[in-house]
Amino acid sequence: MTEMFGGNRLVAHTGARYPILQAPMTWIARAQLTAAVSAAGGLGIMETSSVDLGITRREFEAIRAATDRPFGVNLPILFLRQNEEMERAIIDWVIEHGVRFVTTSAGNPRRHVEQLKEAGVIVYHAVPTLDAALKAEDAGVDGLIVEGAESGGIRNQEEVNSFVLLQAVRERVDLPIVAAGGIVDGRGMAAAMALGADGIAMGTRFVASVESPVHQNYKEAIVDAGADGTMMLPRPPRAKFRTLKTRAALAAAANEEAVAPPRNLIDGLYIEGDVENTMGTAGQSSALIHEVKAVQSIVEETVQGFWREIERLAAMRPAAEHKRNHP
Ligand SMILES: Cc1cc2nc3c(=O)[nH]c(=O)nc-3n(C[C@H](O)[C@H](O)[C@H](O)COP(=O)(O)O)c2cc1C
């Protein structure tokens, strides 16, 4: 099976069977989900945004106990910086415990890239613009996670969607690219690869999976959301975030938050399932998610769908021309 993506640079970097990553997501991308994605042949990425070595260790060990397949770790730079002692401890721990693949996000990768690379760790940095991609390349990262504005999570002020962003980065940068934003299946994966990516990352699709630890109501809200089911809100001082269009989100957009402030995400939404009084993030990709599925089905169907799309496109080429070019 490994030869299926033979020569793929992302697969060579991660050691996973497929060039498919599960995106890091605070509280959600922990052992249960991350281990399931890695066991299915993708690369689970564990989040560390709690900035708590105890939680990081606990989740790390739970993943190791559940699967012997490789997984990655995300370092959210701005969060970690808030506690430099813990930041150092988490990074040292990740290095000492043989993590081979790290993604960095939210901040300047220069802060960690040298130490990680000296230890033999492959580092990919998440970028929302071409400018950020060029800076990350300059900082010496091994690859990029290119996040289009349709994706879920905290987003850049400048909203550039994947269709343009991937091509703009590919025109200027030779590094491996992981496309993130708007992808839920093999069709999206084939499209992203055609635009210049070497692989994909999915966030929202894995939130609405059986193994995702969040409340069923949140998963169903994603399944029920149409193409216009999410919206962007400002996230001071300089960012935005994409949220489901809930009562709380619409109130925030109308500056009515003071009347009924949204509830905390982890308790209110992830644990108790109060969709309307929270602002749960989700990508526009929600429109393409019609069912909560097991992680293994998501990964396998994505790979099968990818090859189906490649064959569909290749079949447009006349056989005679193909022969002429491949004597
Ligand atoms: C529920 C949720 C939480 C997220 N949390 C984080 C996070 O903590 N750190 C981060 O770097 N990105 C976060 N993201 C963004 C993802 O890493 C990824 O870029 C995005 O989900 C890709 O777009 P998609 O949702 O359309 O697949 C989050 C996304 C979602 C949907």
Image (tube, grey):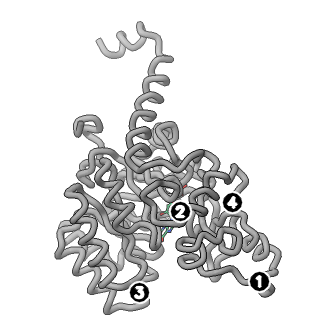
Say what amino acid the circle numbered 4 marks.
Answer: Thr
Marks 4,2: beta carbons within 8 A: no
Say what amino acid the circle numbered 1 marks.
Answer: Ala
The residue that appears at 48% across and 48% down in the rendered structure is: 293
100 or 209: nearer the eye? 209
Q: Earlier in the sequence, mark 4 or mark 1?
A: 4
Above or below residue 193? Residue 158 is: below
| Mark 1, other Cα within 10 Å: few <14 / some 14–19 / many ≥20 | few
Ligand 1 is within 8 Å of the C-beta of the residue at disc 3: no
Give residue 240's quadrant in the image. Answer: bottom right
The residue that appears at 67% across and 53% down in the rendered structure is: 225
Give residue 231's quadrant in the image. Answer: bottom right
What's the distance in space between the residues labelled 4 and 2, CA to CA? 18 Å
- State the mark number for residue 230: 4
Above or below residue 159? Residue 162 is: above
Marks 3,2: beta carbons within 8 A: no
Q: Position of residue 212 (x, y in %)?
A: 45, 61
Residue under numbered circle 1? 260
The residue that appears at 69% across and 50% down in the rendered structure is: 226
Say what amino acid the circle numbered 3 marks.
Answer: Arg
Q: Earlier in the sequence, mark 3 or mark 2?
A: 3
Q: Which of the two discs, 4 and 2, sits closer to the camera?
A: 4
Query: Viewed as shown, does residue 108 lie left or right of 277?
Result: left
What's the distance in space between the residues labelled 4 and 1, CA to CA? 20 Å
- Quarter of the image where the N terminus is located: top left
Residue under numbered circle 3? 81
Q: Earlier in the sequence, mark 1 or mark 3?
A: 3
What's the distance in space between the residues labelled 3 and 2, CA to CA? 20 Å
Query: Viewed as shown, does residue 16 lie left or right of 24?
Result: left
Q: Earlier in the sequence, mark 4 or mark 2?
A: 2
